[in-house]
Amino acid sequence: MPFTRRSALLASGFGLLSPKALAKENSKPSPVREPTQKHLNELNGLVVDVMRKTGVPGMSVAVVSPDHVLFLKGFGVRRAGAAERVDPDTVFQLASLSKPLSTTAVASLVGDGVVSWDHPIVRSLPEFAMSDPWVTCEITLRDMFCHRSGLPDHAGDLVEDIGYGRNEIIRRLRYIKPDTSFRTHYAYNNMGFSAAGFAAAKAAGKSWEDICDEHLYRPLGMANASSRHADFAARRNRAFGHVRRGDRWVVGEQRNPDAQAPAGGASASARDMATWVRMQLGRGALDGREIIKPEGLGETHFPQIATGPAHDPMHGPTFYGLGWDIDYGGPARVRWSHSGAFSLGASTCVYVMPAERFGIVVLSNSAPVGAPETICRSFLDIVLTGKIERDWFALFGEAFAKMAVPAYGRDADYAKPLASAPARASRAIYVGAYRNELYGPIGVVETSDGLSLTLGPIPTPYPLRHYSDDIFTFQPPGENASGVSPVRFSRSGGEKASAVAIDYFNANGQGVFVRS
């Protein structure tokens, strides 16, 4: 469940510059605004205060300026109720903070001439297809990495949640109905982004995980970073994901994001991330060594598509680059940023100020409540203006609270059944196999306790609870699940149900399953 900020862009000449002109402008000497010890002391107190307000179990924070680490510290515990403390080498799942790391790795391939940003995905992934054959032929790494594919926002995530692997998810992109025209609108899509990452790796003749190891983590000395979930799970010093139960944070289901590894599958420590930010500020160089050619890396920082409108007449829109949110907080004050969030227990944030030449990374082991974003934005205010300009905790807390509300089943309180369960003899009208191109086959089966819904490539049963008439409910699985979802059978008279619409799958009108 990624979260992308919509900050304002001050109308300035930067929005009119070409990538080469922008690189030339950004290469002009600018004063380094290095955070002072006073700023760092305030940051320390800020982290403690945000953790107190939210109860988040653990956090790790790094500040870099301009080519060295100024602040690197862990706070809290790796697992609620346990004694192991978070330290700078504690490994966290990064969620969508993986995206700018992924495009950094691909920038290395671009710099080496293995691929270009305009490499057609189908050229190296012939099994890939979109719903429109012309788009299939034309869509490139650039298109997917900046979310201008025409795919609906987050479409395909639920295919992962019910158990399908990366190859099958990528194959099923062809069944997703586009939400907009190709290359005309921004819509955040994890599976499209991941298809681009897998295509780049295939062009290099390697697995995605090996590309990240060989072109990013090892060259930078990111000793604890990986894009394999198995590596993260094997770390002794790792943070467990937490979800909130009432007023307590507890360890819940641990997310395995391998199916969308380029979009959300990386893990790293704050020390690892500090090194990566140093390389970003160094335009591809670290400690005098060129790690990634600046031409390839620089393209990731250039706005590709607008993500939000102007907030007032004096400010322009916000943008997405290649794996980066990009906005301008004032004349020549470009900001690169990204958040990451798993509702199953990860929340992360990075902000880089290239002209000011400093950056901050905040990692946490809780479901998103706005804590990392609050710390990042408040610290930027402290360094740039001397004070916190607004209540960022209220802003981000409210935004994430709204995101946590289910997008399905809003027309009634489906947690409270309106009628008793139908008699056993009537259950047969619902039992059977149903099909849907995007989400695959499902089954409705009768058990000793009633009816169950089976989902996924390895059919997994979920109890159906009667709500009213031909409406049942079930509790969906996975990262994007929240409350119960209505399951609405269609039938005529005493005939067997001919179809079933499941609200959880129906956000884009593709949640109807027809009897086989």
Image (tube, grey):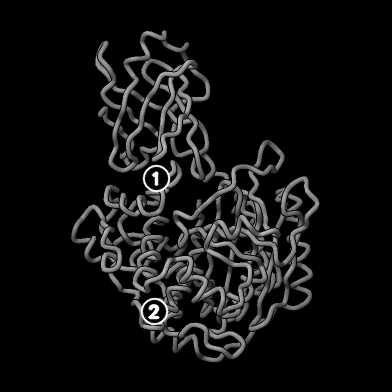
Mark 2: few/some/many CA within 10 Å (<14, 14-19, 20+)? many
Q: Looking at the image, can residue 79 be seen?
A: yes
- Residue drawn 59% across and 58% down? 93
Say which amino acid is labelled 2: Val
Say what secondary structure mark 1 lies in: helix
The residue at which mark 2 appears reads as 110
The residue at which mark 1 appears reads as 159
Q: Is residue 32 above or below residue 445?
A: below
Q: Position of residue 76 (x, y in %)?
A: 76, 56
Q: Position of residue 390 (x, y in %)?
A: 64, 60
Say which amino acid is labelled 1: Val
Q: Residue furthest left?
A: 134
Q: Is residue 439 above or below residue 143?
A: above
Q: Position of residue 40 (x, y in %)?
A: 75, 72
Task: Determine whether, in the image, residue 411 is placed left or right of residue 172.
Answer: right
Q: Is residue 216 above or below residue 458?
A: below
